[in-house]
Image: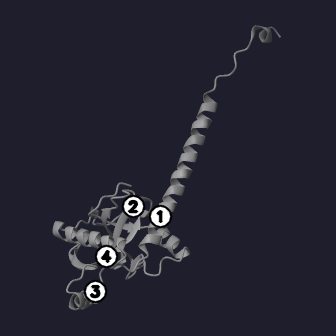
Amino acid sequence: MDVKPGFSYHIKDQYFDMAKERHIDQYLMSNKENGNFRPSFLCLEDKANPELLWFVPISCQIEKYKAEVEKKIARYGKCNTIVIGDFSGKENAFLIQNIFPTTSQYIDHIHTVSGVPVTLQTRLQAEIEDNVKNVLRMHSRGMNLVFTKIDALKQMVMSDLQKSKTAELKTSVLTKLESLKSNDKPPIKKAKDIER
């Protein structure tokens, strides 16, 4: 699947099930909210590894998160872990505090309304991306502002991706070997064999 930053996608349950099995899902948000599948905003590709994608969960529980934003601003003078903005014509909360890494193999489909992919205003998209970059930069320096175990999740998906690549390579090699075998020409009979 061709995935692009700036759009929202639905993540497969398989991703969340795998995190749960490995006991790294304590703060990973549920894949559903109010009975519907939760869309997640693809904010950016990882610079060090373009196969790794960073997603921000989106929530319609706007009053709850507006209150959290106000508390953080009152305490720290700013809030870069939650962004309030328009999503598909309604106010939503973009939860950078619950960011998670994954790969394209765990993306189910792009989020659409009436068949049209939902995009964000350029300004809102830039604000989310800037905050994500800052939060990830601080995390790399030992200042953790996110709830999710992003290092363990990163290791989980990259390990799984490597296994998939190894399996694909093995299948490809076996297919080529089978093809070579089937293309082998039958041995040419010698004259003495024909006379018999």
Which of pointers 3 and 1 lies earlier in the amino acid sequence?
A: 3
Q: Which corner quadrant holds the N terminus?
A: bottom left
Q: Which mark is residue 157?
A: 1
Q: Element type at marker 2?
A: loop
Circle nearer the N terminus (4, 2)? 2
Q: Position of residue 14 (x, y in %)?
A: 49, 68
Q: Please tell me how many numbered marks the rendered image carries.
A: 4
Q: Is residue 84 above or below residue 55?
A: below
At 30% from the left and 85% from the top, the residue drawn is 61
* Other-residue count near label 3 (Cα within 10 Å), few / some / many at <14 / 14–19 / ≥20: some
- Residue 65's tag is 3
- In three-dimensional space, the C-alpha distance between marks 2 and 1, rounded to whole angstroms, equals 8 Å
Q: Residues within 10 Å of mark 4 (few under 14, many from 20)?
A: many
Q: Earlier in the sequence, mark 2 or mark 1?
A: 2
Residue in view at x 28 percent, y 79 percent: 81
Q: Which residue is mark 2?
A: 52
Which residue lies most toward the right here?
A: 196
Q: Amino acid at mark 4?
A: Ile
* Point 34% across, 58% down: residue: 3
- Going by the image, does 104 lie left or right of 136? right
Q: Secondary structure at mark 3?
A: helix
What kind of element bears circle 4? Answer: helix
In this view, which residue lies farthest toward the front?
141
